[in-house]
Image (cartoon, coloured by chain):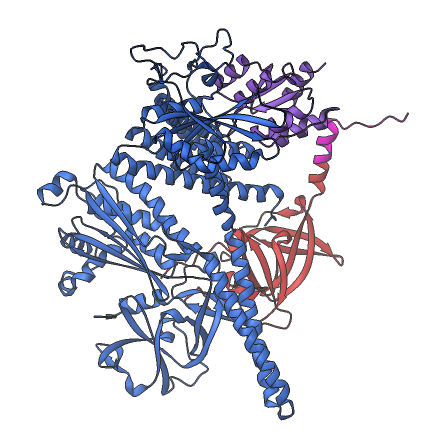
Chain colours: A blue, B purple, C red
Amino acid sequence: MSGEGPTEKALQEFLSEAQEIVEQFNRDLLALDEQRAVGTFDPEVINDAFRAVHSLKGLSGLFGVTRMTNLSHNLENLLDSLRLGRVELQPATLDLLFEAVSLFNRIVGETAAGASGEDGANLVEDLIARLDRVALRKEATPETSPWGGWELDDSLLSVLTEYEEHRLRENIKNGRSLYRIHAAFDLMTIDKGLDELKGRLKPIGEVITYLPSAEAANDQQIELDVILGAQVELRSVQEAVVGTGAIVALLPRQKTGQLRGPAAPATASGADVKPGTAATPATGAAASGDKAAAPKREREEEELTLKSVAQTVRVDIRKLDNLMNIVGELGIARAGLMQILDRIKADRAQQKLARELHIELRSLSRKLDELQAGILEVRMVPLGQVFDKLSRVVRKISRDAGKEIRLTVTGADTELDKLIVEELSDPLMHVMRNCIDHGIEKPEVRKTAGKPEAGTISIRAEQRGNHVVIQIEDDGQGVDEAKLVQKAVERGILNAHDARDLSRRDVQNLMFLPGLSTKDVADEMSGRGVGMDVVKTNIARLSGIIDVESEPGQGTRLTLTLPITLAIIQALIIRAAGRTFAVPLNSVLESLRVTQADVRTIERREVMSLRGQTLPLARLEKLFRLDRADLEGVPNKQFVVVVGLAQHRIGLLVDELHGQEDIVIKSLGRALSEVPGIAGATELGGKKTVLVLDVAQIVEEAVGMGGGQEAA
Amino acid sequence: MRGFVTAALESAGPYTVTQAESGFHALKILPRSRYDLIITDINMPDINGLELVRFIRDSDVHKKTPLIIISTDGREADRDRGMKLGANAYLTKPFAPEQLLEIVRGLLP
Amino acid sequence: MKELPFATEETYLRRQDDRRKHERRGVLSFAVGGEVYGVDILSIREIIKLREITEVPRAPRFLLGVVTVRGLVLPVVDVRLRLRLDVKPLGRAARILVVLHKGERYGLLVDEVRGVVRFADAQIEPPPPSLAPSEAPFLAGIGRYPEDGEERMVILLSLDALLGFDVVRT
C-alpha cells in the first residue's frame, strides 16, 4: 500500500471539509423547507446557504474538483438572486437545491474513490441548466419601485453595494424606519468606540451600512454615519446610544403627494452628486454573487461560528482506530504485568515488592480504563448525522411516490460508534424506502380508511445498556402476512403444514428471508423495493439484529438493536473441545455450571430448565463441527453460557470458563469474512490467537435449528 | 486576499506594502501617511469598499492617489459604482498575480 | 566545449526496449509436496517460521486457520492441500509465506523455502498441458534455469488462482 503523500492528505482534508459544508447547506435547506409551511423565509438562512455554497466553490476550486466548482458557481448565482429578493423561493426551487446536495455528496464520494465521475458530469450539467432557468426566470425588471416614501439621497445610494441596497429595501418593505446616526471617533480608540456603538444598536435594529465622512473636525478624529433600520421610534434609538455622543436623526421622508423615482437627485446633506450618477443600479444580466458587505450581523455570526468550530475537532476515524489499538495493546501489557506480579507474590521473600507493585498496577489500571473510556467516547457520534440524511431522502422518495409523509425524529442525540453510524445510513435508507413505497398508502386510500392523508413515519433512538435501539414505525397498511406465507410456501421455504404453526411474529419476520424480501413480493406495486434480507445482513454485520412487528391496516414497526461500539469489548473466554474462544460479554446474560443430568432432550433438541423456563441449548462443538479426537469425550461437568440478543435466548454448552478479558476484535480479512458464527479474532495475552464468536449468527443458527426461547 | 496581494506585490518588485485589516482600520491609517497606490476590496463588512473610495477621493491627502478596486465576478453593478466614484482600475476575483502586477505597473510611473 | 548528448525520442525508446529484454522477474521458489514452485517475489511481504495456527471452524480444508502477524490476523492456506498434493508431515524447514494480494494479506504454508531466482521474460514458458489436472488452474508458467550445471525447473503459481477462493456461508 502506498503511504499517504501530501496530496493524499490534502485530499482527505478537502473531503472532510467539503462534507461538513454540504451538511451545513443541507441543514439550511431543511430549515427553509420548514419555513415554507409558515410562509416566510428567514433571510439569514438564505444568506447562510449562500455563504456555504460560496465556501464550497472556493474550496473545490483550490483542489481542482471542477464539477463541484461549476455546480457551486451556479448555485451561488441562484442563491444570490434569492437573497436579493430577485427570485422567489418556490417549492420546485427548493427541490432543485436539495438535488444539488445529493449531487455534491455524489461528487465527494467519487472524488474520495478516485473515480472520474464521467457519468456524473451529465447530471451536473443537467442540474446547472435547470438552476439557470430558475435564476433567469424572474430576472425581468429590476426593482424600480420608489423608496417607500423615504427620500434617500444619492450620496448614500451611490456607495451601497447591491447587497446593502437589498437590505435597505427589505427594511423599508418591512415597515421599518430608517435612521442616520452620526458619531465621531477618536482615531486612537475607534475600534472600541465602534464596538460600543454596535453593541447599543444591535438589539434594536439592523445596521445597513457605515458611511465615513472625510470632513472630520480635526486630524485625530473620524466621523461616521451609521444607517440603521429599526422598528422602534426615534426616542428609543436616541436612548440606546446615550453616552456615546452619537446624534440620531430620522432619514428624511418624501413630502406627501410627490412620488419621486429613485433617480431623483439628492437634496441637502452637502455631499457631492457626481454628474450622471444613476442612483438605481443597472441590474441586467443574470444575477451572480459573492460575499457582499453584509451588515455587522454577518460579522457576529462569523464570530459565533468560529467559536463553535474551535470547540470541536475533526478527527480521521483511522487515527481513532489506531489509538484504540494502542489502548488495547496497553491492556495486554497490563495483563502481562499482572502475571509477573503473581509470580513475585508467590515468592515469600518479595512480599514488600509485590505490595508496592500491586499499588502501582492498580493505579495504572484505573488510568487505562479512563483512557479507554475517553477514546471510546471520542468515537461516538450522534445518530442525528444519519437522521438528517434520512429526512432528505424521505422528502424525495415521498414526492416521487406521490405520497405525503410526516417524519418525526426522537433521540437524534443518541450516540453510537462512528463506524456503526456510517454503516447504518444505507440500511436505514432502505427501510425508509420500503416504508414509503409499501407501507404508507396513497393519500386517497388513507382518506378512505379514515386515516389522515399524510402518513407518519417516526424514528426513535434510545440507548439501553450496552445497546442502542432504533425503532422505525409507520402508520401504513402493515405487512401482508397472508401473502408472505403464500410466497414462502410457493418457494419451498416453508411447507403448508408448518406454516399453520407459525406465530404471527414469525410470519412477519419471514420478510427477512432471502427470496421473500419485499423486492420479490413487490410485483403488483411500484416494483421497487429493497431486499430486507440485505438490510438484515448489513445490520448483522454490525452485530445487531432487526425485528418486525405489524398490525394489518394500522402500521409496521421495525426495531434495530445495535451494540454501542465494536472496537474494544469485554469478552468471556471459554474453551470447547480443546479450542479457546472469546464471547462478547455484552451478549452474555449469565453463565452456570451444569452436569449432563441437567440436559434433557425434547424432540431431538437439547434443552435445560432455567428458573422454570425451557432454555434451548447448543453445543458449540456440534455447531462448529469440532472433533474431540484427542480428548476424552464430553465431560460430565460443563458450563452453559446463556447468550441472547433481543428476545432470543440460547445456552451455549462449553467445557471451561476462563474469565473475562478486554479484547480488540480484529477482522479475519475478506476471504474469511463470511465464515458463519465468527466475528473476528483477537490476540490473548499477546500470544494466542483466539476466535471471537458472532453471537447473533450463532443464536440465529441455533434458533433456526429449533425454536429459540422468546422472552415474554 | 490581503495576504495574497501583499505577497504578490512584495515578491515582484520594489514595493512596500502596508495592510489594513478592515475599512475602519484603513480610515485610521490613510490620513497618516502618503501612499502611492491604494488597493481595496469592495465587499467588506462595516465600511464597504465603495464608501472607502469615496472617502479617499474626498480626502485631501489621497484625492489623486491611484486606486484599484477588487470586485467579485459578476458583481458588475458594484464595480461600476466603484469606478464612478473615482477608482482608476478594477480587478475581478479570482485573478492571477500577473494581472495585478500589470495594472499596478500601469498606474505607477 | 564538449558536446552534450541530447536525449532524443529514438534513444529513449531504445532504452525502454533494452530494459524490457533484460527485465528479470524475481521469483521466490519453495518446495511443496516434493516439487518446486514459485510465486512473484514482489507479493511476498515476509517469511515466518511455523507457529500455532488457530483453526477456523467450517472453513475449507485447505484453509488451516488464522495466525496473527504483527497485530494483523491472516488466513493460512496449506498450499499442498490447495494443489491437492500428497501431504507429508511438516519438517523443521516448513515456513509460512506472508503474501499481499489485492490489498489483503494471506499466509502460504510450504515445506521449505528454496531461494530467489530471477528470470527474464524470455525464459518463462507457458504451462504444458500434460501436468496433473488438479494443479492446472493454479499454474502461471514454467521457469527453467541452470544451477550447478543442471537445468532446474520452477512451476510458477498464480496468486489469483491460489487465493481466489471465497468462503461462502453454508
Answer above or below: position of A63 versus A544.
above
The percent coordinates of residue C4 (x first, y second) are: 84, 27
Quadrant of residue A213 in the image?
top right
The percent coordinates of residue A300 (x first, y second) are: 47, 38
The answer to whether residue A686 shows anywhere in this view is no
* A310 within the magenta span: no
* Near-viewer residue (A146 or B107): A146
Number of numbered discs? 0
A158 on left or right of B62: left
Identity of the residue furthest to the right in this view: C1
Quadrant of residue C51 in the image?
bottom right
User: What stretch of residues is rendered in magenta?
Assistant: C1-16
* Near-viewer residue (C115 or A500): A500
A375 on left or right of A428: right
In what quadrant of the picture does the C terminus of chain B appear? top right
Answer above or below: position of B85 versus A681.
above
The percent coordinates of residue C70 (x first, y second) are: 59, 64
Answer above or below: position of A81 versus A557.
above
* C6 within the magenta span: yes
In what quadrant of the picture does the N terminus of chain B appear? top right
The percent coordinates of residue A291 (x first, y second) are: 48, 28
Quadrant of residue A344 in the image?
bottom right
Answer above or below: position of A4 versus C152.
above
A471 on left or right of A332: left
Q: Residue at x 37, y 82 (%)?
A: A639
Q: Residue at x 23, y 38 (%)?
A: A401
A380 on left or right of A648: right
